[in-house]
Amino acid sequence: MNYYSTNQQAPIASLEKAVVKGLAEDRGLYMPERIKPLPASFFDEIEKKSFQEIAYTVADAFFREDVEAEALREIVYDTLSFDCPVVPVTQNIYSLELFHGPTLAFKDVGARFMARLLQYFIRRDTKDHRRVNVLVATSGDTGSAVANGFLGVEGIHVYVLYPKGKVSEIQECQFTTLGQNITAIEVDGVFDDCQRLVKSAFMDEDVNHHLRLTSANSINVARFLPQAFYYFNAYARLKERLTAEQMKHLVMCVPSGNFGNICSALFGRKMGLPFKRFIAANNANDIFYQYLQTGKYNPKASKQTIANAMDVGDPSNFARIYDLHHGNHQEIISYISGATYSDEQIKESMRQCFQDNHYILDPHGACGYRALSEQLQEGETGIFCETAHPAKFKDTVESVIGTTVDIPARLAAFMQGEKQSIPMSKEFPAFKQYLMGE
Ligand SMILES: *Cc1c(COP(=O)(O)O)cnc(C)c1O
């Protein structure tokens, strides 16, 4: 299958090129030329299938033309080494828990899949046996998901650049204690400096001659499309519990920042996944919400909130949503609604949900829960993505609900590891010298 750019000014790319390059030459996002619908018979018996079986069917529709069946199966099964269960919270609201992976957030699914697909392409490409180097700048969570997704994957080395003293201790330990093929680089600067160093490295001829480089941005098709897997599985697991009538009125609510997660759910719908409608839940960064109300997309500077993984003022995947609907605002608002919440409202929902249901929400999931509580109509059943484990935001969550949050064993294990990182100046010549010695 070929991939085109949302800006329409770049050549069509193969899957391999789209994965290795990440962004198209015209700075647009890659989109598959076709989205293959799955047969009705698949949905008729979906509840009898396991998460991995369902995911493989979905992956087959996206990637089968470009990846051999047996290899694709292995990539999918290996990616999904953990479950994404659907858990009841109230009588008609369910939580799709996406935090059971290695770094306790949904980005694990896409990062693990991309690492394995990239490895497949490297092995198949017999011309160049040099290792591939992934450079990623992080303000916290992306670095841990990418580092852990690629951990131990042969033929690939990951460099995580992060701003010294600007990420939480929990976040830092998730990419500085891993060793193996992961190198953490502690930059004496802010996140923007890290991002600038990565961009400079990609543009530097000497570095590119010396090292084979690639990025692992969240806009990469290999990180973004596999997120559809857990939406299909959520449908299957709900079908085990609900009546046929209830299944006709499912509302999927996705706490959104860059809109990659919800966009993969919309791809699922295009493939026939029978969710009735969608809600994009935002924190105070309300650009998409405003677009739904007015039809105008006005990016702004991002605002800092307690749901900080959604502090995005110009969501990259808006371009994909727009393209998917050929820019038709009417069509978009016919089945997608929005919500925007202040930090105070987010806290209030965390408190309320814990009081009423004894379910601990993280600040991102809280936006999703609140939007469903406010917008569900008679006869509808809502599912929201719980995008991260509350322990990742321990201090905030504990101060809001007044109870201690247990740290899962796999997170505690990171915190006991020994921190290893390479100190780096924020000036490019120093970073270049380092890379040239690798
Ligand atoms: C990345 C992230 C989000 C936002 O997801 P998008 O795909 O960027 O919309 C929400 N919650 C958490 C915990 C995240 O890490």
Image (cartoon, rainbow, N blue to C red):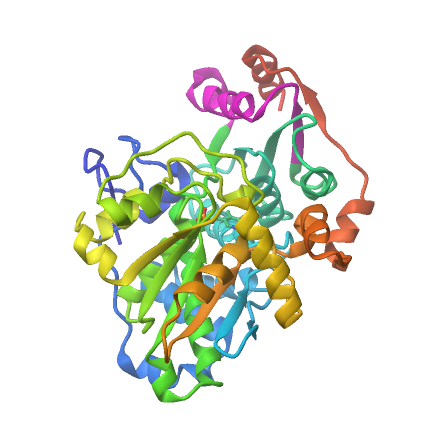
| Labels in figure, total | 0
Asked if residue 209 is among those painted magenta in the image, a careful observer would answer yes
Q: Position of residue 215 (x, y in %)?
A: 47, 36
Is 190 positioned to the left or the right of 273 in the image?
Answer: right
Q: Nearer the viewer, residue 393 or 240?
A: 393
Q: In the rendered image of this protein, does residue 38 appear above or below residue 103?
A: below
Q: Residue at position x 56%, y 71% from top?
A: 85
Q: Position of residue 269 (x, y in %)?
A: 30, 66
Q: Position of residue 13 (x, y in %)?
A: 27, 42
Can residue 176 be seen here? The reply is: yes
Can you tell which quarter of the image residue 288 is in? top left
Q: Nearer the viewer, residue 122 or 225?
A: 225
Q: Residue at position x 55%, y 75% from top?
A: 90
Q: Which residues are magenta?
A: 183-211
Asked if residue 351 is among those painted magenta in the image, a careful observer would answer no
Q: Nearer the viewer, residue 153 or 394?
A: 394
Q: In the rendered image of this protein, does residue 432 appear above or below residue 6?
A: above
Can you tell which quarter of the image residue 351 is in? bottom right
Q: Residue at position x 22%, y 47% from top?
A: 323
Image quadrant holding the N terminus, namely bottom left
Q: Main secondary structure of the magenta part?
A: helix
Q: Position of residue 336 (x, y in %)?
A: 30, 59
Image quadrant holding the C terminus, namely top right
Can residue 3 be seen here? The reply is: no
Is 321 positioned to the left or the right of 227 in the image?
Answer: left
Is 100 positioned to the left or the right of 374 in the image?
Answer: right
